[in-house]
Amino acid sequence: MSSNDDDRLDPRLLGVIGVILLGGLLGILNSTMAAVAVDTLAGAFDTSLSTIGWTSTGFLLAVTATIPFTTWAVDRFGGKRLWLVGLGLFLAGALGAGLAWNVGALIVFRVLQGFGAGLLDPLVLILLARAAGPRHAGRVMGLMGVVLSLGPVLGPITGGAVLSGLSWRWMFLLSVPVGLVALLLALRAIPADSAGEGRTSARLDVMGLALLGPGFAAVVLALSQTAEQGAFTAWQALLPLGVGAALLLAYAARALRKGRGGPPLIDLRLFTSRGFSASVTIMGLGGLALFAALFALPLYYQQAHGHGVLAAGLLMAPIGLGGAVAMPLAGRLSDRIGARGLAAGGAIGAGLSALAFTGIGTDTPEIWPALAAFTIGLGSGCFSAPTMGALYRALPPSMVAQGSSVLYMLNQLGAALGVAVVTLILQTAGDVITGFHGIFWLVVAMIVIILAAVPLLPGSPRTDAVPEEELARTS
């Protein structure tokens, strides 16, 4: 059998990947669509922007708090069962939000959607990693990267198009038929849970869940409040930050203590793997840099060039297209040659493109920021997909769920931190262009750190895994 035959993905596997990515795209689109409707929703319910902001903040906090539970539940109840439950919760929340009769109901249903997304988001990674196996991890994560790249760009465009011609309710109601299709396809395409799934004897680490989920949610809330209040020193940010830090420190002390009954929700000894630690660091900082750029670009097009929401969203498309082009190619190559060279080249390209943005002004023709955004997307795709593939090659199968949860939580944290820092930069800058330049200097700094971490990635597709017996010996 030729190497090309060996590398070809099975049609059944491709079907599973497509169904999983459809569910993942549904969540990303819905959350990013809602972000562009803040003014519209405030007017519709005759309430303040800060109150309406809880439709997004509540969603985000519910997602963050639910992710650690998914780590345990996927082995207790099975991946397919949990996926169907997550889709059901998400669709119920979408239907309720679309029919909401007041702002309180809207916030409650958005939180319900968040619980569903908190199950679905890490399950996308877990189910794809298990279906692909270490051999095809890079390629499959590259396909997933298309969704991750296009989702944040298509969301504002779709939201703007819906709001320009339809009621705000359709932003949520349109998810219902698409979600029903995703649910029916999942019933047919996703393999039934094996005999081993849904039969784990490990008890839920209830105390760990009570510390870790709320702890991460409190830190994300602190960062969201930093962006809203315009200062890290505001009590609205410091209070949840202190609570979150205390809860996370308590979780770390408990998880590292030996001799407790049952395993911790997330084993912190995962970070003893150089490849795993480097991978989650790169992905977290990459999320921070990407969300900073996605936050800054529409503001630049709106304030420096006078475009509306829909036009600004369309002009953001190049950054998503760049990632969508690069991720599948880089992921496939990384399965053969490893992650280091691809990730280093991608980081250099993304860093140089971000550096170009520090010289852009109000009189710069729009073709140049569009090209720079496209090359940032290309560079980000070239380091993201190989890094995600390396992460799953660095984990034994039994640790995939925990690794996925860590990756997603740190990515959420990086995104929230990026938005908070970008907001502060814009508020302290003298004008929009100065603030825009400051944001991209931040992006350059993050990419320099990423480049420094790249040599710590596995050197080949078959090295730097954490042996399961090594974790067992240290228990």
Image (cartoon, rainbow, N blue to C red):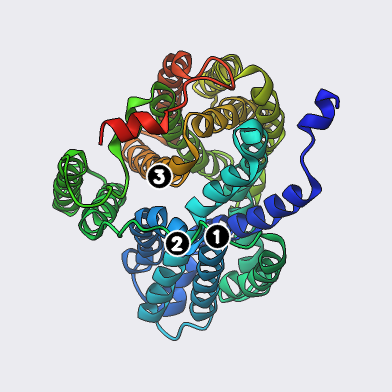
Question: Label 1 amino acid?
Answer: Ala
Residue at screen point 53% across, 23% down? 354
Image coordinates for residue 51, horizontal then vertical, percent: 32, 68
Residue at screen point 29% across, 47% down? 223
Image coordinates for residue 470, horizontal then vertical, percent: 35, 28
For residue 428, say whether it is visible. no
Residue 195 marker: 1
Q: Secondary structure at mark 2?
A: loop
From this view, report whether residue 421 is shown above or below residue 169. above
Residue 292 marker: none
Residue 199 marker: 2
Q: Is residue 7 left or right of residue 280?
A: right
User: Which quarter of the image is occupied by the C terminus?
Assistant: top left
Q: Secondary structure at mark 1?
A: loop
Lower sequence index among marks 1 and 3: 1
User: Which quarter of the image is occupied by the N terminus?
Assistant: top right
Image coordinates for residue 416, horizontal then vertical, percent: 37, 45
From the image, tell me which residue sits under label 3. 402
Q: Are marks 1 and 2 in contact (CB under 8 Å)?
A: yes
Image coordinates for residue 238, horizontal then vertical, percent: 15, 47
- When asked about the image quadrant of residue 309, the answer is bottom right
Question: Label 2 amino acid?
Answer: Arg
Q: Furthest-bottom residue in view?
A: 101
Residue at screen point 49% across, 31% down? 391
Residue nearest the viewer, comparing 169 with 455: 455
Crowding at dot 1, Cα within 10 Å, few <14 / some 14-19 / many 20+, comes out as few
Lower sequence index among marks 2 and 3: 2
